[in-house]
Image (cartoon, rainbow, N blue to C red):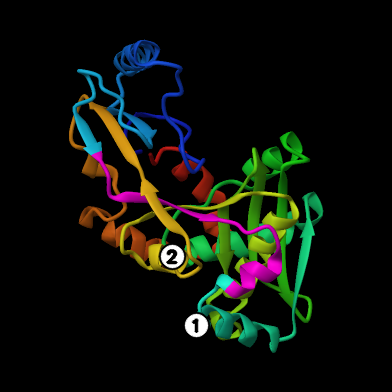
Amino acid sequence: MFGRFLVSLPYLNTAGVVAADCDIASELVDRAVELADALDVRYLELRHEVPCEHPCLNAVNTSKKHLRLRLPSDVEQLWKQFDAKVRNQVRKGDKQGLSVHWGSHDLLDEFYEVFARNMRDLGTPVYGRSLFTAILRTFPEQAELCVVRREGTPLAAALLIHRQSKSEVPSAASLRRFSGTNANMWMYKHLLERAIERKSAVFDFGRSTADSNTFRFKTQWGAKPHPAVWQYYVRRGTIGDMRPENSRYGLAVRMWKRLPVSVTRVLGPFIVRGIP
């Protein structure tokens, strides 16, 4: 629908070339460029954190930032390092009768219900449920789901992955009509505590555009920005052609927000796989 692209592991928080030295990195990019030509894609996108020097990488995007928080060794210290505004919002959630639940496939229906509705409200095609099924099945010791309920109704949910002394949350969502409960803030406090329980030293909030609303949400917890250097081998068009902020997609986004969630759950997975 949108053209063909070659993108390094687009779902994860960070990706790109992993090599022991510059010569090996260059050879990997050589091969990626060959694949881009053979597959006749519009561009190759390598989502680096450190730039890789290569003559074919002819464009760069540094608008994204990785947001990461160094974790203390216990939850009491974590609470103390939150500023007063964050603590106040979490306390408001404490008064809403919320409960937190951890699990795997047993929570997948509730997680996906919240996630799919939130993505529809954002005007973004949703990943297929099968993606999360595969993650939970393939990484049973590292991946888990979190669901926040009130009186049995799921209000917020997240996928949390623990690996190599780091916990990251690649997908999280909350229902807008329950924003007054502060369920999202309350959930993130529990996600951070869970990471400490799993002996993680770092919590990775994921990437966000600098100074966006999600960027500010993550930095309020104390997360610090780290560079994201996305490098491209552009063969046709520009790297901005498929960015969400491109005004040409404004009408499509508004129309998507009006679709029934059931329809977006069917159409979304077929569309999102073609969006870099």
Residue 176 location (% of width, % of height)? 53, 76
Label placed on residue 44: none
Q: Is residue 184 above or below residue 178?
A: above
- Under mark 1, the amino acid is Lys
- Residue 23 visible in image: yes
Q: Is residue 58 left or right of residue 206?
A: left
Find disc 1 in the rendering and name its residue.
85
| Of callouts 1 and 2, the N-terminal one | 1
- Residues at discs 1 and 2 in contact (Cβ within 8 Å): no
- Residue 259 visible in image: no
Residue 270 location (% of width, % of height)? 50, 42
Image quarter in which the N terminus is found: top left
Q: Is residue 128 above or below residue 138?
A: below
Q: Residue at x 63, y 59 (%)?
A: 72
Q: Residue at x 81, y 54 (%)?
A: 106
Badge 2: residue crowd in 10 Å (few <14, some 14–19, many ≥20): some
Residue 109 location (% of width, % of height)? 73, 58
Front-lying residue, 216 or 138: 216
Calculate the distance from the C-alpha at mark 1 to the C-alpha at mark 2: 12 Å
Q: Is residue 126 left or right of residue 71?
A: left
Q: Secondary structure at mark 2?
A: helix
Q: Is residue 169 left or right of residue 98?
A: left
Q: Is residue 235 above or below residue 148?
A: above
Label placed on residue 219: 2
Q: Is residue 268 magenta?
A: no
Which span of residues is magenta-colored? 61-80
